[in-house]
Image (cartoon, helix red, strand yellow):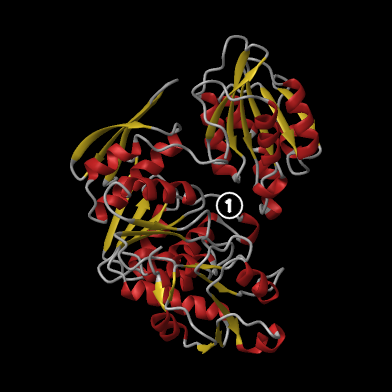
Amino acid sequence: MSVLWTIADLIAATHGRPIGAMPAGITGISIDSRSINTGEAFFAIKGDRVDGHDFAGLAYANGAALLVVSEGKLPALGRLTAPILVVKEVLQALVDLGCAARDRSAAKVIAVTGSVGKTTTKEMLRHSLSACGSVHASAASFNNHWGVPLTLARMPENTTYGVFEIGMNHPDEIRPLVKMVRPHVALVTTIAAAHLGNFASLDEIALAKAEIFEGLAPGGHALLNRDNEQFDVLEQAARAAGVEHIHTFGADPRAEFRLIDYVAGQRSNVLWASIGGQTLEIPMGAPGRHIADNAVAVLGAAYLAGADIETVMKALATMQPEKGRGRRYRLAIDGGYFTLIDESYNANPASMRAAIALLRDTVPGEGGRRIAVLGDMLEMGEFSGQVHAELAAPLAEAGIDDVWIGGTEMAALRDALGEEARVEYRDDADGMQALVLQAVRPGDVLVVKSSKSTGFSRIVAALLDKHEAFPDTERAE
């Protein structure tokens, strides 16, 4: 494998003190002793639950070429004979290395934040820009105080495009992260009631997301959702941060990058969008109006980053949803099949509505039902009862009569649903899993949607384990 960092550059960036016979360089960076690859450097970060120093020996045994440890922890490592780079504090050393990676790179950098669609948009950018050059992007949802510097530090020097997801639960979290990333394009997907328990209003959430503008590279571009109710708040915040180039996307006629139309079909989905003065017809590999919204944002960001839009457009046609974020399965049952839409990764009111719309637009087989399998939305605070009960309206508007719900917070939705809906309620994911496995039948379409930690992903896993994939369907990894 190629060298990611020479040892000289690594020492200079982290201000480390080498002990032992140093390797010439390292091929990667890891903070997990279990998944480290041979030749990588292990950064022994102290987290909330575990301290990486406790696993330094395991990391070395698993192939680490170098251990990066804190000065104060060195005595506890005992007689470990591995090559060691001693730093004042490991997380800060990772931050310093990330900043050095950004300094040495000529990549066009795009940073993505927002209440909904961050990871999907980031993955769409990764996929589509890969057709235009080498892309380095955040793994999974590495969007916090350790995920962002880790992603930066892993960025190869010859990267063409860097794509970074930046998240937050509280104010003042995005600000230090974006100042490391220094994007050329800062994209805010939308503002919605995610983490509402930590904020007094959607405007407060918008202002926290707007911290992303403070780290823009000189001459950089802000890309905002013209359809969102908090657009004015974001635009004012961008101007206050000194951003000169403010662009918009959305279905609003005033949007610079405009969604003209979207048509969902059983086997294909088509988006029409105006990008850079051209009207484009784009077959979409991933279904859903919310995906079309994200695609227009992706096209806008790619245009602002100087990518070839025709190439990006063709790549979008081959984009498929990720596991937990809208991936579909056709699963065999009793001589037929049912359709499973896996939206189990996370949930908030906006993404719940998007999942309900996706279910609405999916046609069941003969005799089948559209079934919403919904679990609690977490981090809603004092607004929890209200936002769960408010899901009754979009379910009714979408004509979803079969609503299977589980979890303490979802009791509010159970109570809000009218008698015309066929409601099944269970206390938790385990109870819901038993129901789903027993009650699903040929022709059904199920969407499974909940906050990640409720365990509703186990329902998806159980269905995939019990039922064989129907021909021309992919199985979960």
- Which image quarter is the C terminus in? top right
Residue 285: x and y in percent read 40, 32
Residue 64: x and y in percent read 56, 70
- Name the residue at 52% across, 30% down: 474
Q: Is residue 143 or residue 38 the one in the foreground? A: 38
- Residue 253 in view (yes/no): no
**Kind of residue sitting beneath label 1:** Ala
Residue at the spot of label 1: 194
Residue 258: x and y in percent read 29, 41
- Which image quarter is the N terminus in? bottom left
Residue 276: x and y in percent read 20, 45
In which quarter of the view is residue 365 placed? top right
Q: Is residue 384 or residue 469 the one in the foreground? A: 469
In which quarter of the view is residue 391 placed? top right
- Residue 118 in view (yes/no): yes
Q: Is residue 354 or residue 192 the one in the foreground? A: 354
Q: Residue furthest left?
A: 277
Task: Estimate how packed mark 1 is, as few (under 14), some (14 to 19) or many (20 or more) residues with alpha carbons within 10 Å.
Answer: many
Instruction: Say left or right for 407 vs 39.
Output: right
- Name the residue at 69% across, 83% down: 77
- Name the residue at 68% across, 44% down: 386
Query: What element does badge 1 sit on?
Result: loop
Q: Is residue 372 or residue 329 the one in the foreground? A: 329
Residue 463 in the image: above or below residue 126: above
Instruction: Say left or right for 175 vs 397.
Output: left
Residue 335 in the image: above or below residue 222: above
